[in-house]
Image: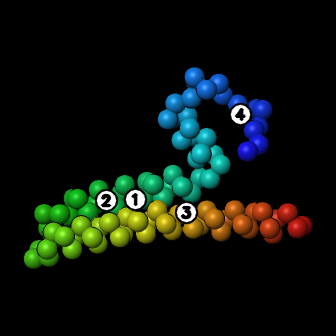
Amino acid sequence: MSTDESSWIPEHETTAGTKLLQKARKSPLVPIGMMGFVVVAAYGLYRLKGRGNMKMSVHLIHTRVAAQACLVGAVTLGAVYSMYKDHFLKQK
């Protein structure tokens, strides 16, 4: 792994928050996907009482699949953007 001298932080000064901020700077779509995951999961929990006659297990499975779709979609968009940046913009 190559290290960038301008972004070096001593080991004892790194926290989970600073690590998350560093990752967010490198690939901003991953935190967006994580936020989408949290929003969909919270909405699923909110709608838990109003699910009608649907079984709870089916409701939870639908909520989980929707939340995972948000996260996987954001990671996929990030990968496509990274490939575009690496291959098409460097050719010009």
Identify the residue position indicated by label 2 in the image: 41
| Label 2 environment density (alpha carbons within 10 Å; few <14, some 14–19, many ≥20) | some
Please identify the residue farthest to the right as the structure is shown: 92
Q: Estimate the x, y position of residue 92 in percent, counting from the top left.
A: 89, 67
- Name the side, left or right, on which 6 lies relative to 32: right
- Which quadrant, please, contains the N terminus? top right
| Label 1 environment density (alpha carbons within 10 Å; few <14, some 14–19, many ≥20) | many
Q: Amino acid at mark 4?
A: Ser
Q: Which mark is residue 75?
A: 3
Q: Estimate the x, y position of residue 69 in percent, counting from the top left.
A: 43, 69
- Name the side, left or right, on which 84 lies relative to 43: right
The first of marks 1 and 4 along the sequence is 4
Is there a contact, CB below 8 Å, between mark 1 and mark 3?
no
The first of marks 3 and 4 along the sequence is 4
Residue at point 65% right, 68% down? Answer: 80
Marks 1/2: CA–CA distance: 6 Å
Identify the residue position indicated by label 1 in the image: 37
Q: Amino acid at mark 1?
A: Phe
Placement of 78 over or under 54, stated as above or below: above
Q: Estimate the x, y position of residue 75 in percent, counting from the top left.
A: 55, 63
- Label 1 residue SS: helix
| Label 3 environment density (alpha carbons within 10 Å; few <14, some 14–19, many ≥20) | many
Is there a contact, CB below 8 Å, between mark 2 and mark 4?
no
Q: Estimate the x, y position of residue 89 in percent, counting from the top left.
A: 82, 65
Q: Amino acid at mark 2?
A: Ala
Is there a contact, CB below 8 Å, between mark 1 and mark 2?
yes
- Name the side, left or right, on which 57 lies relative to 78: left
Q: Which mark is residue 7?
A: 4
Marks 1/3: CA–CA distance: 12 Å
